[in-house]
Image: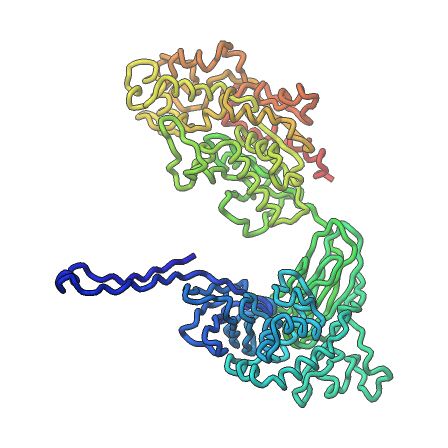
Amino acid sequence: MTIIRLLSLCSFFLLTACGGDGDSSDPAPVIIYSSYNITAIDGYLENATAWLDTQNSGQYVSSNPTATTDAKGKAILSIPNTLTAKDYAIFVEAKQSVTFDNGLDRRITNSFTLAAPAGERIVTPFSTLVYLKMKSGLTKSAAIAVVSSQLQVSGSRLLTDFIATKDSRMTLIAADLVRLNVFPVSPQQLADVALKQGDFNADITNYANIQSDINEFKGVARNSFRTLELDTDIDGVADSDDSDIDGDNIPNEQDTHPYDFDRHTAQSPSELILSQAKFETLLSEQWHYYKLETPEDILLNVSLSQLTGDLDLYVKQDTLPTKFDYDCRSNNSYQSAEKCLQRLKQGQIHYIAVAAQEDSNYRLQAVLDEIVVNKVSLLLHGLASDAGTWDNLVDDDSFYSKSCDILNIHDEIDTLPQVNSNGESCFRLSFGGYDRDTNLSSKGLDGKTCISALGCNGDFSRFELLGTEVEIAIDKIVDKLGIDTEIVLLGHSRGGLAARSYLQNPDSKHKDYVKALVTTGTPHQGSPLGRFYRFMELNCLPQRSYENDGGMCEDNWEVVKMVAGERWYSSKNLMDLRAPSIEFLSPESSEITVLNDNILELENIITAQLSYRGTKFGILAEDISPRGDYDLYEYGQWFGGDHPHPSTLRYMEQGQSRESYIGDGIVPSYSQQLSNLLVPHGRNIDFSLTNNSYNVIHTEQTDQITDLHSMFESVRIAIGWSE
């Protein structure tokens, strides 16, 4: 509620100057304003003027509480506490070329004014009829009874939002009365009608008589005498003026049954047969209806073509569509064609409506298009990496021939992806969408945060957030390519954990589209390297106090700076050991524990693992030091760069030998194997490949094209992509 307080105060100094003995007047009353919501409907009326008729004159007065309606037909009047809003009528003026009727999906072409009785907040053609009946002397309840009986609509619904309640008869009557210019153009004319209702009541009586059969909604038009009359063929010409009453192209004098109009109506939709075209003519403001039967599990293509005017196309399963209730609508104004393309798993009965905004010929046809499965690989990079890690795989002819768009959670997919020779496409997810979110991101060692405006590749996000990024990417892919999309997730290192976080979350959307998960070098049970973070947290913080202590912490901080490219002799950024993702990859971290406790949620999907077992733990990278490969264990070696203190290595080993951690230098071989988590639960991996080659280090795994191709081919066959 908006409250405005107007206080009138007498100055203390003025009083004392006057001697202080004079009478002081009472302060002016406080005026409080409250909101009074109203809704204006023919369709929902946007940019109409609404006001509270505080003068009981029916006229717009600038002092009346006034507002303009929004896209939902709503307006908020500001009412002072000196007024009781429910004691006054509401008026709405809809102006030609200004007010937008959302039911017609265009601005109105003729002005009209509506009203609602005192206490009512929904202003419609029906409320206007009740208002006028009350002006003639009836009580509200009596007025409602008369109007509902006259128009054969529910009295309890008469003053409600008939669009929200999907009352099709009320919706059609309201649109008809406005189309026929029954309501006065201006507030003054409405006030005049309230005083002299004869002609207005005659229109309503004529209209009600024509529409007296609630099972058949008929066409109505004004004849040459401006009287409302039946329009049998709904061509906009009253029967008394129509040379072809039933619209069958046979002049009345030659037509044995001039009133037998039963083609294309809502009561008797014409049959539309698949692949057979219908050629028809439709006049402005009129509708044609068709019924179509199809098999299930189809891609239905309904099209309008050869248009000479503006037509709209509506399609709905099982029931007739309306302007407000449909499964598909195509209304590209002033285009030569309209099309509804629907992928339907179930349902065999479809109703089609063609609505004319202006006179037009049309060709209507429904066909079944071939269902084409969109085969997509989504590549997920790991820690201290980015989408570029997949460049060699993407460029290889056996994969995607240099075509694999990069996605992030903030971008939309503007164009359809290119497909390779196998009809498959590819996207690369760039993690990091939540790294700078102050409410969701995580802080690293010594309060380290992500400062890059582009994000930090997911290194400051928990696994759950990485899974959310995967979900958003899949949602964008399915939204662009449609429901006939199948997806393979290929995750390197932590990218495999992001995929699992998505797949193992029971609330994740679109999991049915994912047919396979392939992981390579993924630390399913963590990595001893993650314990380096915990050691530093326990022993070497804050950095400014320990980075020059002459002991083990100084050694360790020099390692942190070197691998981040911050030492004087090395600018190569391998990884930031201060990032919270390092700690998340510790075997004891809650992130790893929670993910693995939920492993049985990984179901109904083909799984494949690619692991490496030829590199000692601690060999992190090639050519980062003058001695070649950088090995954490070369403490004290000349020209080998900086190395962690031996006590730190012992902490990372947790009583195990270095040899027991053999793998890819960062992730032990046993941790790369998802099967080690599944087997204890009576399940196994579908495909597994282990490479024992010497010195294939962790950061090189996305370049092992032969291994990736071999694994991917097995998966393609299993999910039917090779057929």
In the figure, 70 relative to 658: above or below? below
| Quadrant of residue 276 within the rendered picture | bottom right
Picture coordinates of residue 678 (x, y %)? 65, 23
Picture coordinates of residue 421 (x, y %)? 65, 43
Picture coordinates of residue 377 (x, y %)? 61, 39
Q: Which residue lies at the image location 52% right of the left edge and 77% below the top edge?
A: 96
Residue 342 seen from this side: yes
Left or right side of 311 for 662: left
Picture coordinates of residue 694 (x, y %)? 54, 18
Q: Which residue lies at the image location 34% right of the left edge and 60% below the top edge?
A: 5
Closer to us: 238 or 10: 10
Q: Which residue lies at the image location 72% right of the left edge and 53% below the top edge?
A: 299
Quadrant location of the N terminus in the rendered image: bottom left
In the figure, 244 relative to 431: above or below? below
Q: Which residue lies at the image location 63% right of the left edge and 49% below the top edge?
A: 481
Closer to us: 423 or 447: 447
